[in-house]
Amino acid sequence: MLVARTIEIVEVGPRDGLQNEALLVSSADKVELIRRCIAAGARRIEIASFVNPRKVPQMADAEAVVEALGRPAGVTRIGLVLNLRGAERALAAGADQLGAVAVASDTFGVRNQGQDSAQSVAEAKAIIGMAKAAGRSAQVTIAAAFGCPFEGEIDPARVVEMARQLAAAGPCEVALADTIGVAVPAQVTALVAAIRKAIAPLPVRVHFHDTRNTGVANAWAAVEAGAVTVDASLGGFGGCPFAPGAAGNVGTEDVAWMLARSGIETGLDMRALVDASHWLSGVMGKDLPASLSRAVPFPAGGTA
Ligand code: ZN
């Protein structure tokens, strides 16, 4: 397969990256993080989730973050939502795009968002409809698409059928998420190809966690299989409060470097990403899971 020359990276650090961190990050630092990502070239950013603050305290200031950020030119600000109440909040706050989540397993769906798989598909479709009625766009992610922390293997046919149903509601894309980091490249190649076929011409986005060190390999497999957008988190922070043992997202700088060195443009500036990553490391008071920020620049004298 001919690999695309341009791949979009959606920065999910401000939401997925932070939501599982015990340290409560100030709204001002969240806005600074988003601004640094924009300065590094990010143009679509998951800036917050509009969920129950008792369940995800880190996201309790979603409205304040959106308001303080304002509307940076040329940037699509995604608000992640799990139900219609969250969608109402995100729309009222002014999010440009709603991110809905359908879950491929009943057990994880109930634990993550109080919905079994079928209910999560119905809710996601309603969220997409609500966004469109408000003149905004919506995308949807199929969580636990490659494996469930409670039910184990997920039948790919089930994921394909979910994607088909979700695509009919008119999202701008459908994403496959390896919420717990169990996918391997061969599985990614097969599932991305199957989903592409099921939802064409809608584009496919992918979302990987790097629990078992396959995240960046999975991202490459997805790109080769025709995914056009990859979620990534600055510094490789992240995790899911409802998925035991899940590690962070693939690091934005790691994915961007791999793609750049492979002749694929992402629009991201490597030096600015690494600087922002070091800044975030200072805010969080810990080392970064992502690799690039710990490596010496290559090529020598190059940007990262
Ligand atoms: Zn995630």
Image (cartoon, rainbow, N blue to C red):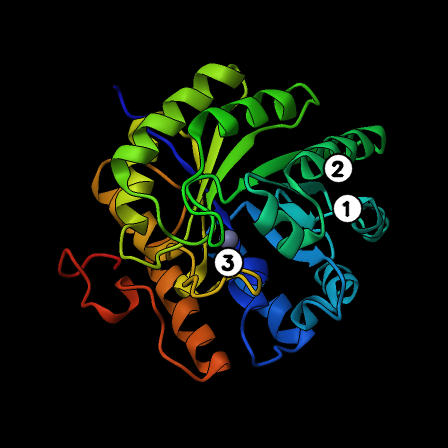
- Rounded to the nearest angstrom, the CA distance separating label 3 from label 1 is 27 Å
Residue 271 vs residue 256, the one in the foreground: 256
Residue 79 percent coordinates (x, y): 69, 50
- Looking at the image, do the residues carrying marks 2 and 3 touch, with CB atoms under 8 Å apart? no
Q: Could you tell me which secondary element the residue under label 2 belongs to?
A: helix
- Rounded to the nearest angstrom, the CA distance separating label 2 from label 3 is 31 Å
Identify the image quadrant of residue 226: top left
In this rendering, the label closer to the viewer, 2 or 3: 2
Kind of residue at badge 2: Glu
Residue 8 percent coordinates (x, y): 45, 38
Kind of residue at badge 3: Cys
Q: Which disc number belongs to residue 83?
A: 1
Residue 42 percent coordinates (x, y): 50, 49
- Rounded to the nearest angstrom, the CA distance separating label 2 from label 1 is 6 Å
In this rendering, the label closer to the viewer, 3 or 1: 1
| Sooner in the amino-acid sequence: mark 3 or mark 1 | 3
Q: Crowding near pointer 3: few (<14 within 10 Å), some, many (20+)?
A: many
| Sooner in the amino-acid sequence: mark 2 or mark 1 | 1
Residue under circle 2?
123
| Sooner in the amino-acid sequence: mark 2 or mark 3 | 3
Q: Is residue 124 above or below residue 158?
A: below
The single residue placed furthest to the front in the displayed view is 151
Residue 160 vs residue 153, the one in the foreground: 153
Confirm whether residue 187 shows in the render: yes
Residue under circle 3?
37
Q: Where is the N terminus found, in terms of image quarters?
A: top left
Identify the image quadrant of residue 292: bottom left
Q: Residue at x 39, y 35 (%)?
A: 7
